[in-house]
Amino acid sequence: MRIFLSRPHMSGHEKHYVNEAFSSNFIAPLGPQLDAFERKLSDYLGTDFYCVGLSSGSAALHLALRIADVGPNDEVWISSMTFAGGIFPVNYLGATPRFFDLDPLSWSIDTSRLAEELAKARAENRLPKAIVPTDLYGQSADIDRLEMLAKQYGVRLIFDSAESLGGSYKNGRKAGTGGDAAILSFNGNKIITTSGGGMLITRNKDWADKARFLATQARDSAPHYEHSTYGYNYRLSNICAAIGLGQMEVLDDRVTRRREIFSRYKAALSHTGITFMPEPKGQHSTRWLTALTIDPNETGVTREDIRLKLMERQIESRPLWKPMHMQPLYAGSPYHGAGVDESLFANGICLPSGSDMTEDQQDEVIEVITAILDITG
């Protein structure tokens, strides 16, 4: 039986909300389930947050960047190690990405390097329009430092928190609550899912209102279809939102389970040359995927040796994100770093981490990996 990397995990609560939507005939994109999902998420994150349900995390980032007035000839400074959907909206708006490396102690965007480049950019009158740090594999970026830098230099700050819903930064502050806005993803492989979908989160009511307006084809107030600007068909389906309502009831349980899976891997695979993703003191990562690196000089095996052996047993695993500055699409783009992300990509792997994975399934994954390490000494 195939062991998946991270598949949807339904709780049973979802049927109740979906049935309510069907019974009331709110099958159109908007409806009471979407309103309730937005409120429930806002309540979960804290006070004074506006949540806008959208068709994907990429759609949320696209809207946030547009509302931040990003356009042609602007720069957006962004984590290089991220999913493509976390960078493509920069292209949609005709802006230019500038990529940044990771801090080896946190695997989050290197804020010291970012601070150095911001100082240079201000002196040269070329500050970016926005900064987009990624909460990599469910771990919040350094919100305090990034907010301080954004304020100091007058730059918009948008967190890509697609993988970190349910995690926290420091002192209980929820991931996804930093900056001018943050975005979430509810893709099928995330901590919770709506089948497909996303959310824009902001404390700024004007931003939330603009996002709703642009996401519903930018239709002006009129009895006919009147448009003074262009918009998108980006709103989250009411049916998908109903699934999300059921998923919210088990969000914390899902995070707890993924953290248990991470801890079990770490306990079983303690071996010279294997390094698990660190967690800065005071933070509470979702451990969306268990991420680790394998030093071939220490272990005698490569990341690919392990990935291919797992695949022989129908066990899905995946290399860490390939940094965007290494992608053919972005060849020649500016990059600031020492290659920490390049090394993580070369030697890193994500192991099956779905919250519905059984202990027997995890034991099988561990067995394959330990066998390889034992064979090669």
Image (spheres, grey):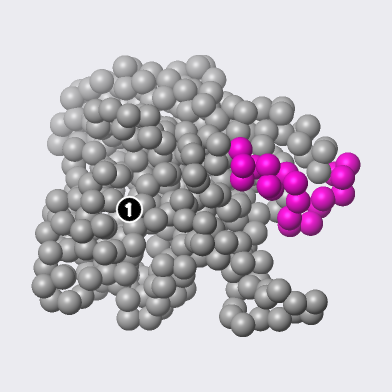
* Boundaries of the magenta span: 22-40
The answer to whether residue 314 is above or below residue 130 is: above
Question: Left of 27 or right of it: where is 133?
Answer: left
Query: Where's the C terminus, which quadrant?
Result: top left
Q: Position of residue 376 (x, y in %)?
A: 23, 26
The rendered magenta stretch, by its main secondary structure, is classed as helix
Front-lying residue, 10 or 132? 132
> The residue under label 1 is which amino acid type?
Pro
Q: What residue sits 34% from the left and 62% below the top?
A: 156
The answer to whether residue 274 is above or below residue 139 is: above
Residue 304 quadrant: top left
Question: Left of 105 or right of it: where is 139?
Answer: right
The answer to whether residue 158 is above or below residue 345 is: below
Q: Position of residue 219 (x, y in %)?
A: 68, 74
Query: Where's the N terminus, which quadrant?
Result: top right
Front-lying residue, 307 or 246? 246
Front-lying residue, 308 or 47? 47
Residue 73 quadrant: bottom left
Q: What residue sits 12% from the left and 64% below the top?
A: 119
**Residue 35 magenta:** yes
Secondary structure category for the residue under label 1: loop
Q: Position of residue 273 (x, y in %)?
A: 19, 30
Q: Which residue is mark 1?
A: 133
